[in-house]
Amino acid sequence: MGLRLARQVLPNQLAQLVKSVVRDPSAQVRREAAITLRFCQGPEADQAWAELASQYDGKDRWYLEALGIGSDLEADTRLAAWKAKVGTKWNNAAGKISFGVAVPKTPCPC
């Protein structure tokens, strides 16, 4: 509920607020944090999203959807931040992020 209220009251501080909950043990809180980043721009928001994305286990469909919403308007920079964070450790179940996030510059793996 706090992040939803913050979207209305503190729109310029959302990335900072999200950073405070990116390691929350509750996937529900992290999903809400990912959605909150949708209209945030800049490196701080990208890093927060990458931290959230790096915790994706490859199983929670709603978490993947929240990551997609949170990266919708900044997909290139969000995915680049995630790739920089995980390096070569992307090729696992969590690698679905690269397909669950609409990125214009991502080549088709076909």
Image: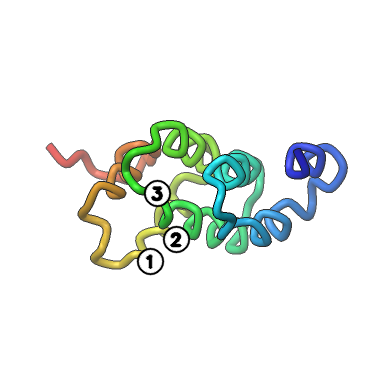
Above or below: residue 60 compared with residue 89: above
Marks 2 and 1 in Cβ contact (< 8 Å):
yes
Q: Which residue is mark 2?
A: 81
Where residue 84 is drawn, which disc sits there? 1
Secondary structure under badge 1?
A: helix
The mark nearer the N terminus, 2 or 3, is: 3
Residue 1 position, x and y percent, is: 75, 38
Q: Where on the picture, by quarter, is residue 15? A: bottom right
Asked if labels 3 and 2 touch by Cβ distance under 8 angstroms, the answer is no
* Residue sitting at x 35%, y 36%: 100
The structure residue drawn at horizontal position 79% and vertical position 52%, both measured from the top left corner, is 12
- CA neighbours of label 1 inside 10 A, class few (<14), some (14 to 19), many (20+): few
Q: To which quarter of the image does residue 108 belong?
A: top left
| Spatial separation of the CA atoms under disc 2 and disc 1 | 5 Å
Mark 1 or mark 3: which comes first in sequence? Answer: 3
Q: Exactly how many numbered labels are in the figure?
A: 3
The amino acid marked with disc number 1 is: Ala
Report crowding for label 3: few under 14, some 14 to 19, many 20 or more residues within 10 A (C-alpha).
Answer: many
* Residue nearest the viewer, comparing 56 with 44: 56
Return the x and y of residue 8 as percentages of the image width and height: 83, 37
The answer to whether marks 1 and 3 mark residues whose Cβ atoms lie closer than 8 Å is: no
* Amino acid tagged 3: Tyr
Residue 56, numbered label? 3
Query: x and y percent of residue 55 in the render?
Result: 43, 55
| Secondary structure found at label 2 | helix
